[in-house]
Image (cartoon, rainbow, N blue to C red):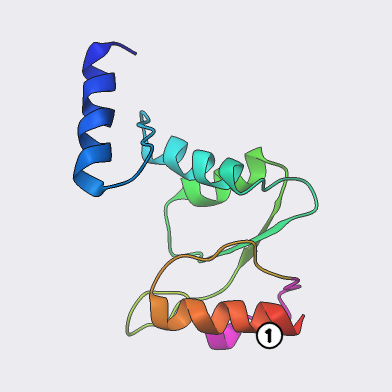
Amino acid sequence: MGPEVNELEEKLVAFVGVKHCISCSSGTDALLIGLMALDIGPGDEVITVPYTWISTAEVIALLNAKTVFVDIRPDTFNMDPDRIEAGYGFHGVKRATGCQKWVDRIIGRSVRH
């Protein structure tokens, strides 16, 4: 990485209003960095949708965590929170992102398990 990357990260920090910015070379690396920041690893389950690029499941496997696929809602293509409990071995959430109206429901289900 050179001075251009440092300059970009500094400008992004100022623009977004955060303390830190980590640039990366690909979306795959971005997914991996995010999961590593959450300390995802062996014994963890990561819920995702099958309607995605292969990198989503790939980075979960790279960290030796278990990929748990939950189908999408056909009207939004987002995860269907009503399908989470349908036999998916769901044990809890470290962090959830996505459509906020469903994130709250997903975290709520995690508390029950």
What residue appears at the point 28 percent right and 30 percent down from the top-left corner? 9
**Kind of residue at badge 1:** Ala
Q: Residue furthest right?
A: 43
State whether residue 88 is above or below residue 109: above
Question: In the image, residue 11 lies at what x, y percent?
Answer: 20, 33
Question: In the image, residue 22 lies at what x, y percent?
Answer: 39, 33
Which quadrant of the figure contains the C terminus? bottom right
Q: Nearer the viewer, residue 11 or 33?
A: 11
Callout 1 environment at 10 Å: few (<14), some (14 to 19), or many (20+)?
Answer: few
Classify residue 58 as left or right of residue 63: left
What residue appears at the point 51 percent right and 81 percent down from the top-left corner? 104
What residue appears at the point 34 percent right and 13 percent down from the top-left corner? 1
Question: In the image, residue 28 lies at what x, y percent?
Answer: 44, 39
Secondary structure beneath dot 1 equals loop
Question: In the image, residue 85 lies at what x, y percent?
Answer: 68, 84
State whether residue 27 is above or below residue 93: above
Magenta span of residues: 81-91
Is residue 29 at least partly visible in the picture?
A: yes
Magenta stretch: dominant secondary structure: loop
Classify residue 40 as left or right of residue 43: left
What residue appears at the point 59 percent right and 84 percent down from the top-left corner? 83
Q: Is residue 83 magenta?
A: yes
Is residue 80 at least partly visible in the picture?
A: no
Q: Residue furthest top?
A: 2
Q: Is residue 51 magenta?
A: no
Residue under numbered circle 1: 86
